[in-house]
Amino acid sequence: MRSNRAITGTLALAIALGHSAIALAADDHDHGSKYGGQFVLVEGHQGVEMVVSSKNITFHITEKDKPADLSGASFKAVVQTEAGVKMYPLTAEGGLLKAELATELPAGSKVALTGKDGHGHTLQARFVTK
């Protein structure tokens, strides 16, 4: 009979593998950053760069290193700080997704980008502000 620890470990591994399409920004993984933000590569071909300045958040979305066509896209940013969780609908402009924030984001804020592009493909990326 398997121990609870082995079952828990197996379950955690299955969950991690099942969510492998979701990108998590690593602190030292900024090689694709072109605008001074944090960059992640999703599913090997879509790039997401998050740039936070003052009370604005911008996501630069690329497809095979070219700006993605986001016409018809529907995205939101979910931001978690010590003050709580807020959702921001994002406006698409070319290959950019933008929103104005209620307040400046402190270091350590968790940001999740989630939504669908104009072709109905789901895109998700997670970041932790520096």
Image (cartoon, rainbow, N blue to C red):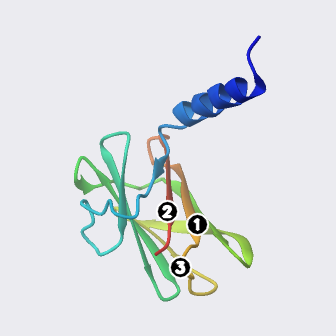
Q: What residue is shown at x 31% (from left), y 40% (from top)?
A: 44
Q: Amino acid at mark 1?
A: Lys
Is the C-beta separation of discs 2 and 3 under 8 Å? Answer: no
28 vs 79, left or right, is: left
Mark 1 crowdedness (10 Å alpha carbons): few <14, some 14-19, many ≥20: some
Of residue 114 and residue 109, the one placed in the foreground of this image is 109
Q: CA distance from mark 1 to mark 3?
A: 9 Å
Q: What residue is shown at x 60% (from left), y 66% (from top)?
A: 89
Mark number for residue 107? 3
**Relative to 108, is 74 above or below?**
above
Q: Secondary structure at mark 2?
A: strand
Q: Secondary structure at mark 1?
A: strand
- Image coordinates for residue 118, horizontal then vertical, percent: 45, 47
Of residue 114 and residue 112, the one placed in the foreground of this image is 112
Is the C-beta separation of discs 2 and 1 under 8 Å? Answer: yes
Is the C-beta separation of discs 1 and 3 under 8 Å? Answer: no
Reading the image, the residue beneath label 2 is 127
Mark 3 crowdedness (10 Å alpha carbons): few <14, some 14-19, many ≥20: few
Q: Quadrant of residue 52?
A: bottom left
Q: What residue is shown at x 43% (from left), y 58% (from top)?
A: 25
Mark sitting earlier along the chain (2/1)? 1
Mark number for residue 16? none
- Image coordinates for residue 60, horizontal then vertical, percent: 36, 64
Reading the image, the residue beneath label 1 is 110
